[in-house]
Image (cartoon, helix red, strand yellow):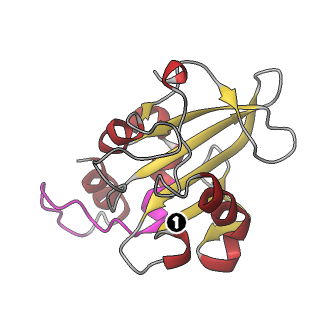
């Protein structure tokens, strides 16, 4: 499992059981996996799509772990089907590009943590990181630290567990 490998790498002196998924709520592991998105996550979009993020970011591509990718593809695009909310441990990454399609050194990350982690944000951990995995200007955590992430996602994704989906023709 991908988290087992990351846990073993981070905690090299600790023995890891092959079926131990490690803590789903460890920001360091989430950010490491997010920075390595092209190797460990599935691409969700067929082509970069318009995004509403910070100035200079015109289009984006979305990535997710396998289980989250399956659920993401059922969004219609602002409502989940009967399969319910995203599971604890879900990871979604938005890879950003400028209006000309050139990569921007910003990845937006959402990871579903344990119940009660961030009740106002549906227990999502939000972060903005560089492509190398470094947190940008302390934009990570929960609550007031990432109000701009939570506020937009709570409005746009109110019926989809704060996840903003794509139209069927945009999906990969």
Residue 161 spot, x, y in % from top left: 46, 57
For the magenta stretch, what is the residue range? 14-31
Left or right, residue 61 beside residue 11: right
The residue closer to the viewer here, 148 or 19, is: 148
Residue 83 spot, x, y in % from top left: 28, 48
Query: Looking at the picture, does residue 20 appear above or below residue 147?
Result: above
Is 128 magenta? The answer is no
Which residue is at a point 33% across and 62% down the rendered structure image? 88
Query: Looking at the picture, does residue 20 appear above or below residue 2?
Result: below
Is 20 magenta? The answer is yes
Query: Looking at the picture, does residue 39 appear above or below residue 31?
Result: above
Secondary structure mostly seen in magenta is loop
In the rendered image, the residue lying farthest to the right is 55
The residue closer to the viewer here, 9 or 75, is: 75
Which residue is at a point 51% across and 37% down the rendered structure image? 77
Q: Quadrant of residue 19?
A: bottom left
Residue 109 spot, x, y in % from top left: 56, 52
Identify residue for label 1: 125
Q: Quadrant of residue 15?
A: bottom left
């Amino acid at each position: 499992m991908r988290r087992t490998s990351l846990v073993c790498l981070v905690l090299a002196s600790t023995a890891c059981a092959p079926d131990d998924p490690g803590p789903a709520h460890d920001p360091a592991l989430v950010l490491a996996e997010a920075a390595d998105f092209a190797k460990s996550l599935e691409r969700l979009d067929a082509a970069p799509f318009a995004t509403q993020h910070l100035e200079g970011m015109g289009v984006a591509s979305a990535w997710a772990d396998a289980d989250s990718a399956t659920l993401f593809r059922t969004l219609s695009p602002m409502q989940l089907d009967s399969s319910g909310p995203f599971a604890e441990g879900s990871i979604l990454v938005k890879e950003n590009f400028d209006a000309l399609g050139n990569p921007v050194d910003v990845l937006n990350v959402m990871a579903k943590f344990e119940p009660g982690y961030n009740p106002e944000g549906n227990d999502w951990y939000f972060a903005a990181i560089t492509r190398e995995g470094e947190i940008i200007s302390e934009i990570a955590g929960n609550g007031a630290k990432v109000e701009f992430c939570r506020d937009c996602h709570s409005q746009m994704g109110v019926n989809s567990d704060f996840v903003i989906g794509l139209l069927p023709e945009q999906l990969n």
